Image: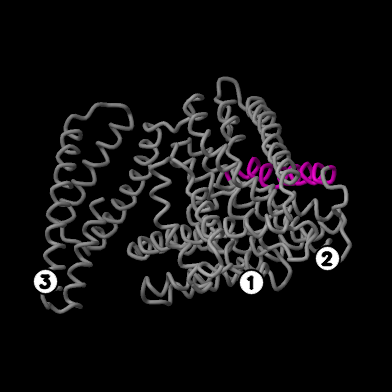
Amino acid sequence: MSQLAVVFVILLGTILITPVADRLKLPYPVLITVFGLVLAVIPNAVVPALRLPPELILPLVLPPLLYAATQRSSWRSFVTNARPILLLAVALVFVSTAAVAAVAGALLPGLPVAATVALGAIVAAPDAAAATSVANRLRLPRRLVSLIEGEGLFNDVTALTLYQVAVAGVVTGSFSAVAVAGRFVYSAVAATAIGLLVGVVTRYLLRWLPTATLQSGLSLLVPFVSYVAADRLEASGVLAVLATGFYLGHYGADPDDAEGRLQSRSFWEVVELLVTGFAFGLIGLELTVVLNGLRGDITGPLIQAGIVCAVVIAVRIAWMLPAGWLSRARSRRKAGPGEAAPTTVGSWRESVVLSWSGMRGVVTVATALALPLDFPERSRILLISFAVILATLVLQGLTLPWLVRVLGVTASSDRQRKAERAIAGRAFEAALRRLNELVDSGEVPTEVSDRLRAWFTVVLGRMRRVEDGEDDPEMARRMALRHELVGLEAELLSVARREVLEERQRGADPAAADRVLRRLDLRSVQRT
């Protein structure tokens, strides 16, 4: 088996293991890591060791994952929650890095200061994908999910800047707080400019490309272009990718490109799954190398790893609970008499959930594996980093659902439906305004416009009555009828698709059959 075959085996394992993890209610990265470990213990004659240069880990893994995360979020959501997100993504990362560095310095007296800071930066940043996947499954309030997503995106910038300065300090023998501050400011300014420039160019290229397939292909390359361009100028590749992703998410969306949106969403879900699986599979493959590098001395490193894990978890709890209380107190002071206090963390219960949502993931994997091969105590640092990942994923990932149930921190279904109805109502009103404009210009026959206007008016009226809490038996009857019709149509479309596929196998023109099948598929998507 070649090294390329090992990569394909990891990707195949990711696809097969993910549904198993869902059934077992386990974080799928944990099972994929175990799968990688199983591959690693198989003799090299059967499964050769995967030798990936450390300097390629970050550029291969991070850009697509960060870009995919920006497509799930929005710039406006970040601006709304900017203060708490920056406190988590910048201040807490600095505090966590300093705490871990101090503990590592005490545990490993001979380790250079820059190396302890590198370890702190590796384990300081929670992973957006790991925490968000758990949060969405638990139906947490949207404001908490926004905080978790925003923190996971922007803490990578802070952690990677600290990491790069620390690694450079080990290599050159020079490390200082001034260097960290200067690098941070330069990285932020230069990376933002590069990311926005790539976003502007990409926006026009996307409009020029004629098909959704070509647009998806370009979108796959864009995050790598942003990352590499910023990295070449010694700026933050992570921030450049975020700037590009947020710009395109805000300005690059074409309202009429429904097919492109559907294809892009599915495409990026696949990319994110495979890249995440590959990264965690590498942990398992690398663990045997790490253990061999420790030359049998495993007890001491495991104790050190346990201490660092405890510090990482404790620092987040010690930060979040007082910060949540201060945020609520500040909101109460700003609110007028009789007004509700606006806050991004609504109660101490939400603060507890947020403090327990610090699962480490892909960024910790990538930065740990990207350490130079001759880095001081590399094997020990890798073991500690992997232990933090597994401990937070297993301990916090498995107990977070129980904690959410006990504290009763879940999103209100009524509130979610109300928000959806409000957005849908504004969309209907915009469509009705456009219809009136077309009628005034004489572009639409009166008979057609009257029927459409009557339909829009009825739908809007019913939505407003539901919004006001009024019962609408007619709407309830129509919704029940619609559910029956959707179910029946789904069954009929399934029969039709099966017939088209059989016709194709019997010798019908494949191109004609595929066009018919595509129309049936689009109809099915429209009805869901």
Mark 2 neighbour class, 10 Å CA radius: few under 14, some 14 to 19, many 20 or more: some
Residue under label 3, please give it. Answer: 503
Q: Position of residue 260 (x, y in %)?
A: 37, 65
Q: Nearer the viewer, residue 508 or 279?
A: 279
What's the amino acid at mark 1?
A: Val
Q: Residue at x 56, y 58 (%)?
A: 41
Name the disc covering residue 228, or none: 1
Q: Residue at x 68, y 55 (%)?
A: 291
- Residue 442, placed above or below residue 358: below
Q: Position of residue 80 (x, y in %)?
A: 57, 44
Residue under label 2, please give it. Answer: 171
> What is the distance, in whole Å, between disc 2 and disc 3 at their CAs?
65 Å
Q: Is residue 390 magenta?
A: no
> What is the distance, in whole Å, between disc 1 and disc 2 at their CAs?
22 Å
| Magenta region, main secondary structure | helix
Q: Position of residue 417 (x, y in %)?
A: 35, 37
Start and end of the magenta stretch?
Answer: 80-106
Q: How many marks?
A: 3
